[in-house]
Image: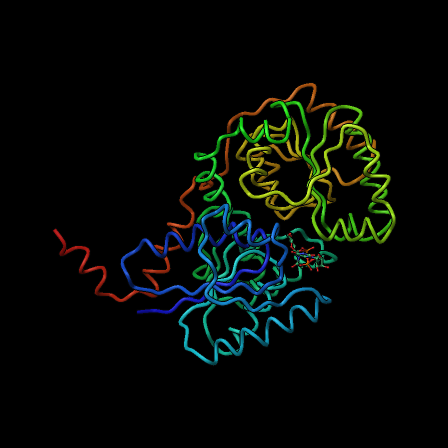
Amino acid sequence: MKRLLLIVGTRPNFVKIDPILRALDSQDSWCSTTLVHTGQHYDEAMSESLFVDLGLRKPEINLGISGGSHAQQTARVMVAIEELLQQSSYDLVIVVGDVNSTLAATLAAVKLQIPVAHIEAGLRSGDRTMPEEINRLCVDAISTMLFTTSRDANDNLYREGVPPDKVHFVGNVMIDTMLRILRELDRNSVLEKYALTAKNYAILTAHRPSNVDSADGLNNMLKIIQGTGQRLEIVFPLHPRTLQRLKELDLLNRLQAVKRLKLLPPLGYRDFLALQADAAVVLTDSGGIQEETTVLGIPCLTLRENTERPITVSEGTNLILGTDYERVMQALDAVLDNFHWNGQTPEYWDGHAAARIAEILRKKLGPAWSHHQDVATP
Ligand code: UD1
């Protein structure tokens, strides 16, 4: 029996690992899975509530490592994962996304010569001022198996010299989760809970350092929020990082004064998905939301200068706008006035990405007999 160690640390990681665990656990028993939470996200609203909403099992191990600078956070997770890997033998470490926990676990495992599978490999924004871009480059350079969400990600990896046999285009696990939960949602009751009417409101999220860490960045956001509020109601769930900065820079009062703004704590996965699905428009600097809106057919105005997910622009509903006020307002007016979705979704964003990953892992790591046994079973 092969032993797989799966690592999560932050909110989007939980959404990505859930379908992979489900797919692995539903296969014939060639592997056992151990889930580790590094603790990078620790607030109830950012962590525990996601586990409940997804029905994700409690991690077997919680390292309780949170806060600190990038180096401190990464180093502390590395030390803890190294200890774990030395205490007990594992055949594969699975990491997802591009956060500091992803990088730390990868470095620790690879240096102990334990193979690493990276899910959501090959995404590149080309912007090395983003911490996530550095994490992506490093993780992909040293991982053993690379699973991609789109073919352009494969091309990025080939361009960087990754041998093609390491790369597997499987689709998008975040969309696996979204499609599963969407089927179970009672969207009307969520609209009622927040006193909203379908297609009558915007959702806004902001947590990127470039948008929320400086006074300039936050003032820019504030202006965009005020402009949006003149056009329609806004729902703004506040990421802890953003709330912290708003308080530090004494801008929370000005934000609270914006008309037609519902300022909320971070929402659960189900509520946020339901609200996304019925929004008129979403304004965001998140990566995952660019993908989710593409499959939901909701216009997405991305408040960043670039994206590592270009397929959401070429085949989806995403517009990369940056944070220039006039530019964002023009785009907002245009989509509110006239938006048509062609119903197209990217290849393999179909709810079966995790099953493809599990199948590839079984073929690569599983015992040869499992295949013969399948064939022999009547
Ligand atoms: C991290 C990821 C980012 C991802 C985001 C999703 C990195 C480099 N960044 O950013 O790619 O899009 O998660 O949310 O890994 N905090 C709390 N409570 C929490 C979590 C964080 O108060 O539950 C505070 C931290 O103490 C810290 C700040 O928020 O002061 C930022 O948290 P951190 O985990 O460093 O990065 P994020 O901004 O959440």
Say which residue appears at 70% left-offset and 70% top-offset.
71
Quadrant containing the N terminus is bottom left
Outermost residue toward the front?
Answer: 193
The vertical placement of 179 against 90, above or below, is above
x and y percentages locating residue 362 in the rendered image: 33, 60
The vertical placement of 46 against 201, above or below, is below
In this view of the protein, which residue sits in the foreground, 245 or 179? Answer: 245
Outermost residue toward the top?
Answer: 337
Outermost residue toward the bottom?
Answer: 86
Say which residue appears at 52% left-offset and 49% top-offset.
15
**How did the renderer colour the structure?**
rainbow
Say which residue appears at 48% left-offset and 34% top-offset.
185
Please indicate whether residue 90 sits to the left or right of residue 374 in the image. Answer: right
* Image quadrant, ligand 1: bottom right
x and y percentages locating residue 143 in the rendered image: 51, 66
Please indicate whether residue 85 sits to the left or right of residue 338 in the image. Answer: left
In this view of the protein, which residue sits in the foreground, 199 or 102? Answer: 199
x and y percentages locating residue 112 in the rendered image: 50, 78
> Which quadrant of the structure image shows residue 323?
top right
In this view of the protein, which residue sits in the foreground, 327 or 8? Answer: 8
